[in-house]
Amino acid sequence: MCGIVGYIGKRNAYPILIKGLHRLEYRGYDSAGVALINAQGQLNIYKAKGKVAELEAYASDKDTTGTIGIAHTRWATHGEPNTVNAHPHYSESERLAIIHNGIIENYAVLKAGLQKEGYSFKSETDTEVLIQLIEYTQVNKHVDLRTAVQLALQQVIGAYAIAVLDKDHPDTLIAARKGSPLVVGVGQEEYFIASDATPIVEYTDKVIYIEDEEVVKLSTKGQSTKGQSTKGQSTKGQSTKDEGIEITTINNVQKTPEIKRLELSLSQLEKGGYPHFMLKEIFEQPRTLADSMRGRVNVRQDNIALSGFIDNKERFMNAKRIIITACGTSWHAGLIAMYAIEEFAQIPVEVEYSSEFRYRKPVINRDDVVIAISQSGETADTLAAIQLAKEKGAFIFSICNVIGASIPRLSNSGCYTHVGPEIGVASTKAFTAQVVALTMLALCIGKEKGTMSEEQYLHVVRALGQIPDKIECVLSQNKRIADFAKTFTYAQNFIYLGRGYNYPVALEGALKLKEISYIHAEGYPAAEMKHGPIALISQEMPVVVVAPRCGTYEKVVSNIQEIKARNGRVIAIVTEGDKMVSKIADYVIEVPETEECLTPLLTVIPLQLLAYHIAVVKGCDVDQPRNLAKSVTVE
Ligand code: AGP
């Protein structure tokens, strides 16, 4: 996944673009580049391998003037990360420039056709093919830039969010999307485009979410003062005529721009005094979970009200099966949901990796409910999975954290987690919010179906209300966890074990460690140790065991004893006051008692902190781990 940002208006574009790239850097950071048209009509492109800071250093003595520009931070799909493959790309004449987030699947065919027409290519990228196709179309069909972009995109198979400049028309910026996100920011005599709202929020709260196969033309030609700035006023859903904005489809069907008000604040984007976004987001969890339950979990009335469920009760009541589709950490949340939904609602649940589900020709019935879980709402495989399910008539319910993202827009209904932007690539607050949302859904279905007792329902609802405070208790052990994390940086391998609701927590803990400290880790159902992995036990491989006092606790204690008998080192997550595990484990972290189905919300916190502190001691880039991106919007 890459980040794109563009500006056209009355200010110098470069500082706006660079700051925007920093805000988008979590989307990919293999290379970065900027294209600017200066007052003399020169189109200048500067690119650097590595992070945005490398680009800034490279461009520090260059001409970075100009009131129109586009910029890009890359997560490489075609072609290795270097300055040749970095975006923006010139067209052959060097009159046009393009940036692109996505994948053009038929680029090789298009490239061969252009080569026959005498075009040559400098890079290995699919993006350079697109800008050559746009120029070829413009020159040979004698059309303007927007029309050339429309005609070229009609030939493209794949996903794109692009922005294109023409140095002969410095008052026009063209952008378009299909399958990759694109947001337009509407300022006063100035416009912004970006992959998400984070580069825009400090300039305007008026945004337009561009739909698939739409082309937007932003122009400052004949700009006159347009109305008053509406920052802070509600323009929700209003469509305000703005001559500088024209939206069409790639088939040139006119569309009316629908300007919405952005619900995102700058402070939500800053680190708030923490050394990393990830640590800030770990510590935000008491508040973010309270936010995600507000208006939904009413402890005084012992009730849960989930509008996405209430409006679609019959679909859930008639469901013969629930299919959960997600990737990564979101898939782990789905696995926890399987335990809760089957326990409380007694509906069979299948949890699918989206990338497998979309290709394995699954059986999908019209009375299936498909739950898509995605923090970003842009994960390509999950988006494709629900497209498939929707075509087969299933009801799509999504759990997402980004309002207006592609997955919720494609769903029949859903539930936003409302935890604010999650900047750290390793998902933390979004995961716990997903678990809360899915638990609320399971409780709503179970209560409506009468498959769980009123008493059990009340216990869990009341326990949910106490979770934010109980997470605060766990977070108070941060310093202690940081201290003993230092003793494990030597490890090359970890094993994480858990049972029942905490087996997915073991998987999640292992993923956290892998993705930010680069230490290999595997999660297993605790009983599986005896079926092979126990052969690995040694002092050199720490074993983390999630062992709250509930469910099959005694079995987990036996598993720990089996490990200790073979000289293994055990870090155990236990319930406060635990007497058995504390006697045999090497390190113990206590979490408060709660209902079994809610224990993952507490037991995952020490695992988030453990991974974080090990990664910090190892000097890893915690917020932007190597090779990763925050949302995988390409296959
Ligand atoms: C989580 O720590 C990872 N960054 C990754 O596994 C992530 O959960 C996965 O890519 C799914 O992303 P999504 O929730 O935005 O769909």
Image (cartoon, helix red, strand yellow):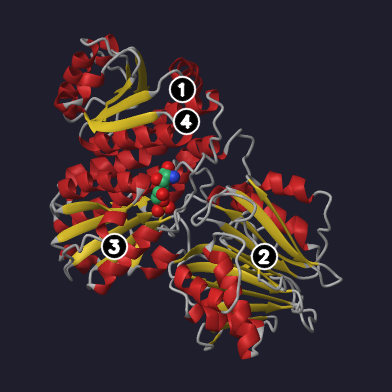
Q: Residue at x 51, y 51 (%)?
A: 420
Identify residue type, mark 3: Phe
Label 1 element class: loop
Asked which quadrant contains residue 248, the reply is: bottom right
Identify residue type, mark 2: Gly
Kindly report which numbered mark, 3 or 4, lies closer to the viewer in this rendering.
4
Determine which residue is flagged by label 1.
477
Tell me the distance, in whole angstroms, between the alpha carbons under discs 3 and 4. Answer: 39 Å
Tell me the distance, in whole angstroms, between the alpha carbons under discs 1 and 3. Answer: 37 Å
Residue 79 is situated, as x and y percent measured from the top left of the image, at 52, 54
Kindly report which numbered mark, 1 or 4, lies closer to the viewer in this rendering.
4
Residue 264 is situated, as x and y percent measured from the top left of the image, at 58, 57
Determine which residue is flagged by label 4.
517
Q: Is residue 298 visible?
A: no
Determine whether 219 is above or below 557 in the image: below
Identify residue type, mark 4: Ser
Quick check: is the Cβ at mark 2 less than 8 Å away from ligand 1?
no
Reading the chain from its start, which is encountered first: label 1 or label 4? 1
Asked which quadrant contains residue 431, the reply is: top left
Classed neighbour count for the residue bearing mark 2: other residues with Cα under 10 Å, few (<14), some (14–19), many (≥20): many
**Which numbered marker is on residue 6?**
2
